[in-house]
Amino acid sequence: MSKSSKYGELFLLWALCTVCTSATAYIYLSTVINLYSVIGAVMSAVIILFIEFVRKKKFGGVLYVAVLICVSLVPRFTITSWSEMSQFVLWFFSGSEAVETTTDFIFTLTVMMCFCFTSAAYYFTKVIYRSSIMTLITLIPFALAVKTVTALPYAYPAIAAALNIIFFVFNARKSLLENAKPSGKSTFTVYADFTGAVILLALLLPKPSVTPYYDKFEEMTNRFQIGGSNETMYSGEYKDVSGNTDELRRGESVLIYIASTSDPVYMKTQVFDIYDYEQGGWVEADKMTGNKKWQDSAPLLNYEKLSEAINSLYENGMEQTEYLQKLSDVTEKESYALIYTQNYPAAYILAPLRATELSLSSINASYSARTDDGEIFTNLRHLPADAGYTVRYYTEDVFDRLVSKGLCDTNSDDYDMELYWAWIYAMSEDMEEEAEIIDAFFDQHSYAEEYAEKTVTEVSPEIQSLADELTEGLDYDYQKAEAIEQYFHSGFRYDLNYEPPEDSDTPEYFLFNSKTGICSDFATAYTLLARAAGLTVRYVEGFVMQQAKNNAELHYIYTDTAHAYPEVYITGAGWQIYEPTPASITPSGNRSENDGNGEFDALAGLFTAIIAVVVIGFFILMFFLAPKLAELLFRVRVSLSDSGKAVILLYNRHSANMEHKFGESCKALTPEQLGFYTESKTALSLEPLTKPFIKTCYGGIAPEKDEKKTAFDCYKAQYKAIKKIKKRKD
């Protein structure tokens, strides 16, 4: 290889490594020209020159390994603790969204990535050329961009694709000049390279709002662990102050649960009672305590069972009341959810609002307990990271039936008296089963009244005035709760990235100024308004489910499906979930546009498909035309060469064509022997070519122009004859 070709190949290699390193730095710095791109470019040049140097030395391998060890120790000096390493991993996979970029982080990444890119690219271009592996190496920064949902400038994939194609053409040309015989493996690498080029070119197109291949990367990264089996990127904790939802939603999206259920519901983790204006968050009123026998009483809170109990009392002679008569024929539906934890050790059990039973057969826990607010936990500080359990619960659709029957058209005192006298009658008649059911509803109502007294909240005059305005003329709890909910569904906007002005992060500013926020802002404002309107309401943090495609019963729970929402006690119907957040993820799994994941852009998808088909078609066409194009370029080169060089080129090319077609080496044959061998195959004389070749190589005499033309015509005739033989053989 000439020096110009050698240095040209090294320059292409350096350019490709520089593009990959710069693209990686852009993901975290959002600038094309930056210090670390320059560092990467300089490092790539140094590494290439270093490898060129050590390849010629006897102990070059030892020197390279020594440098490799030094590079691998860089994180040891820049990231000094496991907690810092955890932050680095989170920073790396979130594209600096979850953790702020630091000098140590970006420097470590630049050094490691640059060394890996350059070493791998050098080996698979200068030592053993493998186009498919080179394409995969080039795809690394673009795959990382997909994982971190970062839009790279179009120039990066365009330049990377172009350099890969140039490498391919360069090595294909070199192979032809070296008389390399194509094989099945080389054909496979050609297709792989074309496929990679198509992918790179597809990256030039604007991305649809939902990335179809994002989940695959998610599955690869959500199991990432450091520091031992119990130290993971995320863990579920109980908090002293609300805000866990905000932390999870603003961090990296990681799959933490898979749920199998036909009735997706909101999953509660923790309830907060008092709003602390100084901290700007919610706190618990009392220390969390739970009832270990909750699975005995929870199933009793069933309106169908209550209906049957009241009917039994009537049949036994109890005086009928207009309100309790409305309970007749109320039906309930029970469902269950199989929960599979995905590398997420949590202190809590995911708890549907009306959970009735918990199966912990695969978890070594001695008990489970449930608080009066519905939180469920075990004796374990954390459940196993791969825990699996089953939760049974009553579905929430009974609420609409209760409202339609008028059972919610009552006030707290009247409802209390209805239950109280029914319970007294059941006890007096020794109807213990019926009394137990009525008592469960009576206890729930009594606790709600106590909770309202315990959580009385002073609100600003502005919030009080708005609450009075929204509920004016409404008599019942469910009417007021719905009116406040509907208020947030017009004129408010969900924006995960919105930051209010300094010292303005208050419920009042959200309600009357910005009207922009995230689920915790909506849930907080709703809870304060509802309490100002006299409702019993609690602030809840938990998760909602995202339904899997083509499987109605399979649902995913990610860290970014964490959610804050209010639960309101409705007289006559118990605790109910309301949803003030207009852009929340619903339990059915649909994400709204304001949540950052809108519907798939059909036009962009169609455009991408068309471009992909065109590009693939182009490369397939090029694949079949490549031999003809190579031959055309060769003949142009011969035409432009002097007579002596042209004859040598023609002779060598003909020898390579014969070897390629008939599979026998022609390098060791003399011109005379090659002439006899050729004539035996094509029935054409090779003398017009071998004669000037011998004259040039052995006599040192340059052929005349007419001899060059005769040799050229002979080559063309031989080439045509060889092609005809190929057609007959095929």
Image (tube, rainbow, N blue to C red):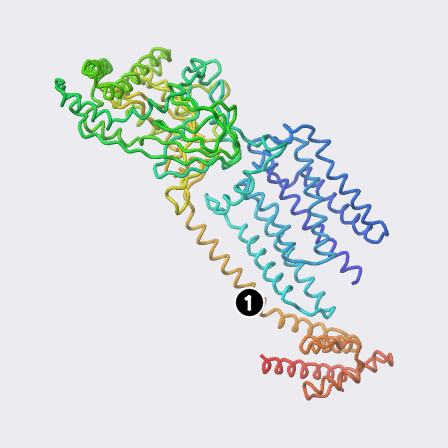
Question: Residue 667, how many percent across, how many down?
Answer: 78, 75
The answer to whether 44 appears left or right of 28 in the picture is right
Q: Toward which corner of the image does residue 167 lie, by quadrant?
A: bottom right
Kindly identify which residue carries mark 1. Answer: 621
Q: Residue at (64%, 50%) from the top-left corner?
A: 137
Compared to residue 476, the image places residue 518 above or below, namely: below
Q: Nearer the viewer, residue 224 or 316?
A: 316
Task: Indicate left or right for 624 with 697 as reference.
Answer: left
Q: Looking at the picture, does residue 54 appear above or below residue 677? A: above
Q: Number of marks in the image? A: 1
Q: Residue furthest front?
A: 430
Q: Amino acid at mark 1?
A: Leu
Asked which quadrant contains residue 477, the reply is top left
As drawn, 393 above or below 509:
below
At numbered mark 1, what does the secondary structure look like: helix, strand or loop?
helix
Q: Residue at x 42, y 15 (%)?
A: 275
**Crowding near the residue tagged with mark 1, few <14, some 14–19, many ≥20 C-alpha atoms within 10 Å:** few
Q: Is residue 535 rendered to the left or right of residue 618? A: left
Comparing 237 with 35, the one in front is: 237
Image coords of residue 282 (percent x, y): 44, 18
Give left or right: position of 503 versus 124: left
